[in-house]
Image (tube, grey):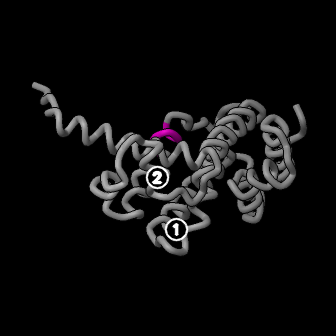
């Protein structure tokens, strides 16, 4: 028999969700150092409520990180390395670009404050390692005969740093950045245009 949460538990869950949603929305709007007052106003709660549910900024950042990972989990699925390389490359670029677009606002904010929050810095490294592993696994058949530096190049081409350079520094639209990532990966892997 499933338990039904009482009213207070349901309200607390809604409040926690509203706070996380508010901070994510502010980050997505470019408010990389949102204040407690801004988060509270967006969430429709008191500033005191934030600190009742999240006693530290680290706790709030951890909750935002968990929400982001859940959102990423909805986008990402394993790509079979036995799939023909052209299809695999297209699927990888589509999936990776969607993830990187989703993560960009929170990644920018995280990089600004990572020095002040060691747990956040560790989270950034963990996400980086997972993305690297997924890229290397996706292209394992092509990377196997190549020098180790090819793996590093694939990981770099598929990284958030490269994506940010394409989108923010080069000013490419989404489709252009996807095509550039595809070209970088194809070139590294020695794949001709299909």
- Say which element carries label 1: helix
Q: Which residue is rendered at x = 50% and y = 39% of the image?
A: 71
Classify the position of the N terminus by image quarter.
top left
Q: Does 50 sit left or right of 98 as displayed?
A: left
Dominant SS in magenta: helix
Q: Which residue is rendered at x = 89% and y = 39% of the image?
A: 192
Q: Which residue is rendered at x = 57% and y = 52% of the image?
A: 106
Residue 185 in picture, x, y percent from top left: 79, 48
- Say which element carries label 2: helix
Q: Which mark is residue 121?
A: 1
Q: Which quadrant holds residue 80?
A: top right
How many numbered circles are shown? 2
Residue 17 in picture, x, y percent from top left: 37, 41
Classify the position of the C terminus by image quarter.
top right
Give the residues drawn in magenta, as a range.
Answer: 69-73
Q: Are marks 2 and 1 in contact (CB under 8 Å)?
A: no
The correct choice, above or below, for 176 with respect to 132 in the image is above
The correct choice, above or below, for 51 with respect to 191 in the image is below
Q: Which residue is mark 2?
A: 65
């Amino acid at each position: 028999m499933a338990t039904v949460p009482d009213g207070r538990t349901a309200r607390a869950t809604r409040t926690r969700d509203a706070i996380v949603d508010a901070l994510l929305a502010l980050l997505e709007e470019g408010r990389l150092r949102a204040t407690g007052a801004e988060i509270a106003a967006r969430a429709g709660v008191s500033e005191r409520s934030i600190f009742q549910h999240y006693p530290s900024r680290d706790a709030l950042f951890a909750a935002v990180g968990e929400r982001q990972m859940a959102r990423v989990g909805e986008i990402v699925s394993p790509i079979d390395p036995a799939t023909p390389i052209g299809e695999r490359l297209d699927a990888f670029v589509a999936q990776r670009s969607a993830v990187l677009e989703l993560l960009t606002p929170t990644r920018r904010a995280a990089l600004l404050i990572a020095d002040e929050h060691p747990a956040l810095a560790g989270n950034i490294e963990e996400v980086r390692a997972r993305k690297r592993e997924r890229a290397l696994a996706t292209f394992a058949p092509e990377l196997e005969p190549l020098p180790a530096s090819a793996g590093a190049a694939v990981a770099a081409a598929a990284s958030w740093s490269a994506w940010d350079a394409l989108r923010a520094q080069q000013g490419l639209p989404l489709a252009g950045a996807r095509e550039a990532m595809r070209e970088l990966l194809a070139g590294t892997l020695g794949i001709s245009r299909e």
